[in-house]
Image (tube, rainbow, N blue to C red):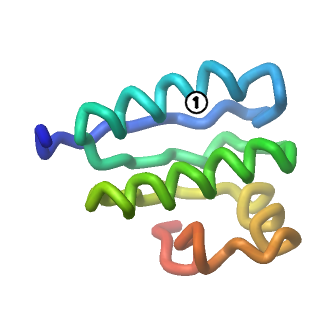
Amino acid sequence: MTGSEQHITLNQHLDLDDLPRLAREIGAAIESGSSLILDGSAVNTVHAAAMQLLLATVRSARQKGLSCQWRQPSNALKEAAILLGTVEELSLDDTDQ
């Protein structure tokens, strides 16, 4: 593990078109042993598949002993997590504003 942090800024629209790029970026960061800082401040719309990817990201990071933190998740992101019942598992209940 490198012990570094990888900042990943989520796009305004987390839709199916953006998921392959986002999955590659997240996967590369996790494989390099970097802790993740996910910036969700710009997110306005969220597809359910994007929430699945984010949930898999948090789980994968935890399994590898990596930190995965949120930076300013938007209301849209939080609301999507509430609707899907994933706020706690995504650790969106203890984020900075």
In the picture shown, does residue 36 fall above or below 63? above
Q: Quadrant of residue 10?
A: top right
Residue situated furthest front in the rendering: 63
Q: What is the three-letter code of the residue carrying label 1? A: Ala
Q: Is residue 14 left or right of residue 91?
A: right
Residue in front for this viewpoint, 91 or 13: 91
User: Which residue is at the far left?
Assistant: 2
Q: Quadrant of residue 5?
A: top left
Task: Check the image and report above or below for 22 versus 77.
Answer: above
- Residue at (68, 56) in percent of width and height: 74
Question: Residue 16 placed where, x, y %?
Answer: 83, 28
The residue lying at 67 percent from left, 22 percent from top is 20
Residue 17: give x, y in percent of width and height.
80, 20
Query: Image quarter for residue 12?
Result: top right
Mark 1 residue crowding within 10 angstroms, few (<14) / some (14–19) / many (20+): some
Describe residue 73's horizontal placement relative to residue 48 as left or right: left
Residue 60, position as x, y percentages in the image: 45, 53
Left or right: residue 13 compared with residue 65: right
Residue designated by label 1: 23
Is 87 placed left or right of 27 in the picture?
A: right
Q: Tag 1, which secondary structure?
A: helix
Residue occupying the point 39% across, 54% down: 61
Q: Nearer the viewer, residue 47 or 71?
A: 47
Say which quadrant the N terminus sits in: top left
